[in-house]
Structures are given as C-alpha cells and as structure tokens.
Image (cartoon, grey):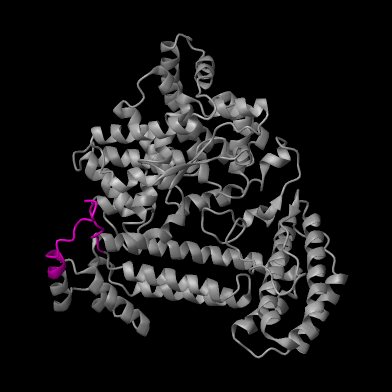
Amino acid sequence: MKADRRQILKSGVAILGAGALNAQELFGQARPAAKAAAHSASNCACETAADGSPLDTGTSEIAPVVERYQVELADLNRIFLPGSALHQSKVEAFYTGQLHLLETINFDALSRSGKVDYLLLRARLLQEQKQLAEDAKQDAEVAAILPWQQDVFGLEEARRRMDTLDAKKAAATLSALTTKLVAAKPPAGANPAVLGRSASRVQELRGVLQEWNTFYALYDPSYAFWVSEELKRTDAALGKYAEALFAASGAPGTLEPVPSLRGVPGGAAAGGRGGPGGRGGAAAGRGAAGGRGRARSNAPLGSEEEIAGIGPVGSEALTAELRQAWIPYTPEELIVLANKEFDWCDKEMLKATAEMGFGTDWKAALEKAKNDYVEPGKMIYWVRDNARDAVAFMEAHEVLTIPAGVKQDWWEQAMTPQQQLVNPFFTGGATIQVSSPASSMTYEEKLASQRANNIYEGYATVFHELVPGHHMQGYMSARYRTYRRGFASAGPFWSEGMAFYWEMLMWDLGWFRTPEQRVGALFWRKERCARIIFSVNFNLKKMTALECVKFLMDRVGHDRPSAEGEVRRSFNGSYSPIYQCAYMLGALQFYALHKELVGGGKMSNRQFHDAFYREGNMPIEMVRAAISEVPLTRDYQSKWKFYGNLS
C-alpha cells in the first residue's frame, strides 16, 4: 500500500532532525493519518498540470533521506573550507553516518522506487567516500609542500566561528608566513602533478585570504593599521611561489590570475574545488589534472602539447570511472564494442554511398554532403524549421508525450568563433547554440564552419540538442523526481546516451529518408564509435593526441579543424575520462532496454519513453530496475551486460 509522500516526508524529516531514525516507523506500513492523507490526495483531481501534462505523483520512501543528504552535504561544503583538515574530518564523518543510516533501513519493505533510490544513494555515498579518501591522499601530498597552509585556513575558520579578531596577532601570522614564502623553493625531485596541485592550492589560499580581508577591511578599524599592508606583501609572496611551483611542474601555460588586493576593500570569493581538478562530481576533471585544469596553454594551436590537454589518466582511473557509471565492461572490451558498431556503420555507409552514385568511395559521398550548407545568416531559420519538423514527426509516430511547454520555451544563441575552436558543432539545452560562420572569421574559418554544420549532418543533430533530446531532458528533470538531480553527476550516460539513442530510433522510424541524410546520420554514428576508441586509447597511452586527430579524419571523415576541436574538447580537463564513451554506451543501453520491454511486448513506445524521462537522470541500469521487474537486493551491483559478453 502506498502512503502519501508528503506525509512520509514530514515524518521522515522530523525523525532525521531528531537524530534518531526508526526505520520501521519511517518505512513500514502507512499510519492511519497517512492513509487518510493518501485517500484525500487521490480525490483532489490534481493529476495533471494546467497544460494537461501529468504531474509528478511518484512516491519513494527514500526521497526524504536523499533530499536531506543533499542539503546537509551542501551545508558542509559551504561551512568548512575544502582542502582543510576540518573539512576532511567533517565530511568523512558525514558519509559514515549516512551509510550507517541506510543500514538501519528495512530494504525488503521498500517499494521498487524506494529500492532504486536506496541503491542510487548508497552507490553515490560509496563513490563520494572513495573520492574523499583519494582527495585526502592528494591533500597530504600538497600539505607536505605547503606545511604553512593551515595558518591561512585558521584565519578564515576563526572568522567563520565569529572569534574576536586580534589584528596585531593576525599581522604577526602573516609576517611569519611572508618570511617563509620568500625563502621557499619548490622541492627538487617532487612529482610534477603534486607540484601542479600545490600551485593551484596556493591560488585558492590567496582567494581565502581575500574573502577574509573583505570582511575585516569593511568592519574593523584596527585591521587597516595592522594587517592591510602586511596582507599585500603576503599575497605578492604567495603569487610568486605559485608561479614557481607551476613552472617547476613543467605544465604548459600560466595559472589563472587571482585579482589584486589593491583597492581594499574588495577581493574575490574564496577558491573552491568544484571545477576541473576538484571534487565537482564525476563529470568534472579530477586528480589526474594535477591542478593543470586551471592553466591556459601557450602552446601553438594544433600542436600535440596544446591538444593533449591534461594528458592520459591510465587504466586504473578509466576502470574506476566505468564502475561508478554502472558500466560492467573493461576499457579493452569497450574497444571491441565500438569496432562492432563501426562495422555496422561501414556497411550502411557503403549502401548510401552507392545510392548517391559514388560506388564504394564513402569519403566522396561525405564530401558532397559537407558542401551542401545553407547561406550565411540563414542557419538560424534552418535550425528552427528542422526542430519543428522533428517534433511533428515524433508526434505522428506516437512514440512519446511531448508537453506543450517544451515545444515553445527554447530559442537560439550564436556559437562564437572562439567557442567553435573547441566545439565546432551545435550544443543545446534551454537554448541551442548555433554554429555558423561569423563575419570576423577568415575565409578558411568560414568555410570550415559551414562544412562542419552542413545540412545533412545538422539534420541528425538538431533534435538531439532540443526535442526529444537535451532540451526536453532538462524540462522533464525539473518537473519529475527532482530529488534525483544529485545523481545526475554520476555521468552523462543518461543525458548524452538518450539524445544519441533518439538518433538511433529515428533511423529505425524512417526519419532519414534520402541517402544524403543517411550519410549525415552515419557520420555522427561513426563519430560516437570513434570517440570510444580514441578517448580510451589515449587514456591507456596507446594513442597520442595527434594520432587521435588523424584517426577522426581517416576513419570518420572529419576536416582537420573539427577533428582538432573534438580531441581538444575531450582532453581539456572539463570532462571525465569516459565522457566521450557515454554517447554510444548510453544509447546502446537505452536501445537494449527498448528491445527488452517494447520489443518484448511489456510496454508501448509511449509508455517506455515517458517512463524514462519521468524517472530522471541516473545510471541506465537503475532506469531498467525502476521500470521493469529486475530483482533488487541491498547489495545489488552493476551486472547488466547490455551488449552481451565481449570477453
């Protein structure tokens, strides 16, 4: 019997707030009051929104635990300075407590939705706990090079405790720190990655001091006399030492600057670690960057050094990322999978090539397609019309429910020439970033932009970015199972995989009618195969960056600028090492699940597609668990071989 979720939420928050979870009380049979509330809710005639689309009426007993976890973790990261010993101990205790809480819950008494959320939260906690331990090792390496960093953390921690400031004592702390920094030299023989992380940490500490300074410069008259000038000297010494550490690391480029302390009061926000090289979730670059994700490369465009970005991460890191994403295959097995999919693409490409009159010369067929593009200034209208045609096609085939709002709450923006160096193609979401030539480009750049965004390749990407792709994903995720947003950082397999899955399904439904349109679609399908092969091989140190560029040109048919942009984007530290694998792997998971449930007669197309939007962004194996009858246990592990046995 399902209890009213709002009633469960109230009781759950109250119990958690008291710090004494009674699992039977929270997750057992609904009490009479909850039953009455559920009965009342069922009679409220509020199953649909004003636009006629279904409201989120799904329930999960674990939802209050997930929501509380997200709020409390955000508070810990806000209150305690990342990188400090205090932050480490507080977050470590938090994860231990959360895992203990889950152990007290009667898993077998949960609904299917509750079991899915339990497993998602447990996997997330174990992943975060493991990452915290890895961070602790890296922080210890940094602390060995920066033994004085706690002096800086201590000043800001005292401010956050609202301790009374002793300005003279603070100035003495800064003076002693400046003396240490002036005499400091990067340790000889230290690991370059550790030196890079240490350089980034120094920059973060400068940010911490600036936040500390901003507060007292405004409110404490004695502060200016004792501290202001001393802090400027400390900041200058920190800046010089950061540059020295960074230079010693051997990384190309320069550190991102920290705004000057001149013109006090002012100052930047404290440096956090949520971006590349930090703990920003699986989609962000992590320890492998060694702090280099903050660098701006001075290497020539198109060189090995410039394109290679943060460098390979190795087999162990790749395997760990795959496990966290619920992918039960090894990196080597992914190469086998990608080559099997490549074989299918090659056969279909030759069929389309022959229909176009080019025999077996698929590159000639692709070249013809690339030279069919819209005139400058007209791309925005072509994208608009193509997006509307795709919506009409999907609705005519009755494969999913498209809410009225999702059809009208998007618009277009321009992809700048600078952005096109990194990503020469469309990107989408609430807006679609349209790539087309700009007047400021050279002749060669304009031509490259038009060829990269030709009619036939664009025909396969506009709906990927908008409806039913990324835009609709965001629209639905904001309205259904919103407490699951925290699980989205487990990886891009749901979002990118689903968008590419629609390309595969649209192929099956007959969206690509002409051989030219099929050539454009196959270019992208080959591209997704190639992304697995070149990104895995690069991270296994089996291919260089320039070999990846050549592979894309030879095997997929990229022009040199778009191939460089693809590889540059893959390795610049903004994405996880397996991000580029997610398109094909996620699509194949959805495709296998469609065959299992729709092909098996268990669900209609509309039921299936509506369900995975409403379940939310999470590992696709858990989508399968949520909408099918997969047996679930408390210790359930990833085991779904969605592509069969590849070993």
- Horizontally, is 381 left or right of 561 in the view? left
| 457 inside magenta stretch | no
Q: Quadrant of the C terminus?
A: top left
> What stretch of residues is rendered in magenta?
39-59
Q: Residue at x 74, y 70 (%)?
A: 144
Asked if residue 555 is positioned above or below residue 546 in the image, the reply reads above
Determine if residue 74 is in view: yes
Asked if residue 581 is positioned above or below residue 100 in the image, the reply reads above
Q: x and y percent of residue 75 in the render? A: 49, 74
Q: Decide whether the magenta segment is chiefly helix, strand or loop.
A: loop
Q: Quadrant of residue 584?
A: top left
Q: Residue at x 51, y 16 (%)?
A: 368
Residue that extends furthest to the right in the rendered view of this protein: 183
Q: Residue at x 49, y 29 (%)?
A: 378
496 or 166: which is nearer to us? 166
Q: Quadrant of residue 38?
A: bottom left
Asked if residue 631 is positioned above or below residue 80 in the image, the reply reads above
| 56 inside magenta stretch | yes
